[in-house]
Amino acid sequence: MVFPDVVLCPYFIDRSAFGHGAAYGRDDRPVLTETERKSVSRETTFEHDLHPRQDRAQLTDILTTLCDRVAADLHGLGVRGRTVGIKLRYADFRTLTRDLTVREPLDDPEGLLAASRECLRRAPPDRPLRLLGVRVSTLVPVDEATEDPGSWVQGELAFDE
């Protein structure tokens, strides 16, 4: 049912013109495309499923590359992050995530790799993976972040279990 503005005005006063236009997909407000970034991530989908035990070396190389790329993205944006997360997608398309929050913000590949490995230690290494991803969130500008080289969690190679 379509109501002209004349009918809607008494009920919605100054909002009727907007409501009428919105109902027809019209909105003259400017489109804002710039928003504050909440996280930085990289992920890769494998051509064939990789098993955490049998394909450990290949997965380690992929994880290292993802951490290098996320670190480069963080540097390019001039930010560091306090929360590091991993994303695992299995052959059946189920997705598992694990996060770790550190005391001091990170932006270096080694710190991101160590934190990612710690996250992986909390994921069962028993099923083939289709996708692996690394994410950093709780971002802060570099000039607001303090430097403490001992602030990241060191972990064994998570695929070694």
Image (cartoon, rainbow, N blue to C red):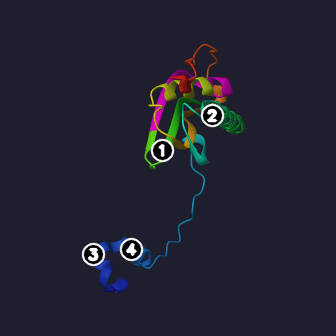
- Distance (Cα) linking label 3 and label 4: 11 Å
Q: Mark number for residue 19?
A: 4
Residue type at mark 3? Tyr
- Distance (Cα) linking label 2 and label 4: 49 Å
Q: Mark 2 points at which residue?
A: 63
- Mark 3 lies on a secondary structure that is helix
- Choose the circle earlier in sequence order: 3 or 2: 3
- Distance (Cα) linking label 1 and label 2: 16 Å
Above or below, comparing residue 16 to residue 70 in the picture: below
Above or below, comparing residue 13 to residue 102 in the picture: below
- Mark 1 lies on a secondary structure that is strand
* Viewer-nearest of discs 1 and 4: 1
- Choose the circle earlier in sequence order: 1 or 2: 2
Residue type at mark 2? Leu
- Choose the circle earlier in sequence order: 2 or 4: 4
Residue 110 visible in the shown view:
yes
Residue shown at the point (59%, 48%) measured from the top left: 48
Query: In the rendering, at what x and y percent does residue 70 appear?
Result: 65, 37
Q: Name the residue under label 3.
A: 11
- Mark 2 lies on a secondary structure that is helix
- Choose the circle earlier in sequence order: 3 or 1: 3
* Viewer-nearest of discs 2 and 4: 2
Q: Name the residue under label 1.
A: 90
* Viewer-nearest of discs 3 and 2: 2
